[in-house]
Image (spheres, rainbow, N blue to C red):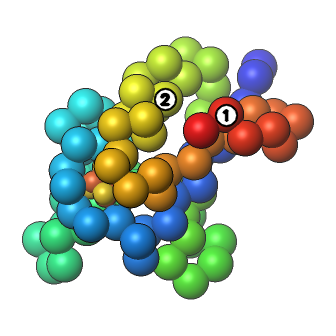
Amino acid sequence: MAKFKVVYERNACIGAGACAALLEERWKISDMDGKANLLGGVETKPGVFEYEFTEEELERVLESAEACPVNVIHIYDEEGNKIV
Ligand code: SF4
């Protein structure tokens, strides 16, 4: 099963909310600081969150990443190539 990965640089999020509007089961704006939280994500470095997913989710996750106005949502394929 193909595995993709979201790498999210939370510190640089400006809280625009585009990601959460498109994919609410994965992105939720925090009541604390107004930045997006990656639901199910794991913090791998301070402020950097990752989440692995399969091809079934790819189209919608891609859409939410591409909508981010400050490009802080990155997507990699299973070979580590950057898609977004
Ligand atoms: S679209 Fe980008 S800037 Fe806006 S809330 Fe999501 S991650 Fe943050």
Q: Are marks 1 and 2 in contact (CB under 8 Å)?
A: yes
Q: Quadrant of ligand 1?
A: bottom left
Reading the image, the residue beneath label 1 is 83
Reading the image, the residue beneath label 2 is 62
Q: Is residue 51 shown left or right of residue 4?
A: left
Describe the element under mark 2 as helix, strand or loop. helix
Q: Is residue 29 shown left or right of residue 10?
A: left
Assign the N terminus to one quadrant of the image: top right
Is residue 65 visible to the viewer in this orientation of the structure? yes
33 shown above or below 4: below
Assign the C terminus to one quadrant of the image: top right
22 shown above or below 71: above
Please provide percent x and percent y for residue 75: 61, 41
Outermost residue, right side: 79
Q: Amino acid at mark 2?
A: Leu
Q: Amino acid at mark 1?
A: Ile
Counting residues from the start of the chain, the first of labels 1 and 2 encountered is 2
Outermost residue, front side: 69
Please provide percent x and percent y for residue 80: 83, 43
Count of residue discs? 2
Q: Say which quarter of the image contains residue 22.
A: top left
